[in-house]
Amino acid sequence: RKSIETIQESGHRAAAIVQDLLTVARGVATTKEPLNLNDLVGDYLNSPEFKQLEQFHPTVTVKTKLDADLLNIGGSNVHIRKVVMNLLSNSSESIEGSGNVTISTMNRYVDRPLRGYDDVNIGEYAVLAVSDDGPGIPLDDLERIFEPFYTKKVMGRSGTGLGLGVVWNVVQDHKGYIDVTTDEKGTTFELYFPITRDEISDKALSIPIKDYKGNGETILVVDDVKSQREITCKMLNTLGYITKAVSSGEEAVEYFKENTADLLLLDMIMDPGINGRETYERVIKIHPNQKAIIVSGFAETDEVKKTQELGAGLYIKKPFKLEKIGLAVKKELAK
């Protein structure tokens, strides 16, 4: 009986290696659909594969920290689920004795290229992060960890030797990026997937769109990144607003010398030129009661608070969903 089980296990491993080799052969994920990383994480944590991982590593605790407002991505369900599985397996195997693995998701707006393991381009991303408190990856190994079959550890029983190679290729296939940070206290893998504003087919908007549609009000969008101006204007146009757009604070001030707007949608950090706070200071000298919403890819700062003290309204973190910007605009215009 034992020899039959050995043959079966060898067969399963051979099949797993073939599947992983197919994934490493780039371009496998040809069919992309709107997905939410939170759903994929939840599905995996309720799967037989995860139960098996827990049996292999009973002293490792897996924790989650998932952003409830996470935006969707366009992707292949099968391949990204494999990424989640391989990262959790890799992190669990790296821990000697007891420890923790944390899987997190978050929206992240990159308005300047980020230098990391991969250089992350400007854009809007849903980020999947897996952190462990293992011993870290030696710097000599760091450059080679995504090579197929490159491993210094004994693979888990389900391992094919291709785990991180699969992760790398799936992320590349989804036009995403990977950053890795490591030290003696642990390692974090951050995977950046470009977002989509397409909805998952069986998920309706939680708030009916009629509840936050506009009535032809004019909104001036101020942002130094062209793609961000275009996305924001498209969303606001969908909601029934008339939009104007400029690329700097100085242009916004000039606009208000000759024109009016029911609402100013103001990026906080613009380069080069004046920032959002200084822009708003100059605008309210021309139109003292100008309504404004602040948007930024960064956490709320003192500059944001100072702008709000001057009279600006809500602060919204990029990237944002249609619902979020729609409700914020509706609320600000109603003041």
Image (cartoon, rainbow, N blue to C red):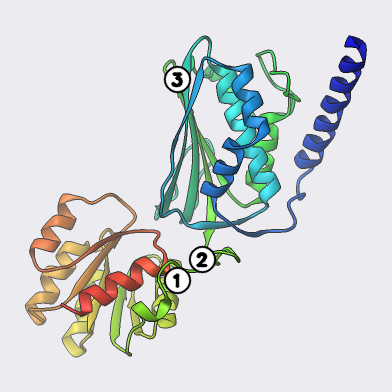
| Foreground residue among 34 and 43 | 43
Please report whichever mark, 2 or 1, sits nearer to the chain's N-terminal start: 2
User: Would residue 247 be visible to someone looking at this image?
Assistant: no
Q: Position of residue 64 (x, y in %)?
A: 45, 35
Q: Are marks 3 and 2 in contact (CB under 8 Å)?
A: no
Q: Are marks 2 and 1 in contact (CB under 8 Å)?
A: yes
Q: Quadrant of the C terminus?
A: bottom left
Please report whichever mark, 1 or 3, sits nearer to the chain's N-terminal start: 3
Is 251 placed above or below 303 here? below
Q: Which residue is mark 2?
A: 197
The reply, left or right, for residue 172 in relation to residue 220 is right
Q: Which residue is mark 3?
A: 133
Q: Position of residue 71 (x, y in %)?
A: 47, 57
Distance between the alpha carbons at the discs numbered 3 and 2: 34 Å
| Foreground residue among 191 and 133 | 133
- Amino acid type shown at disc 1: Ile
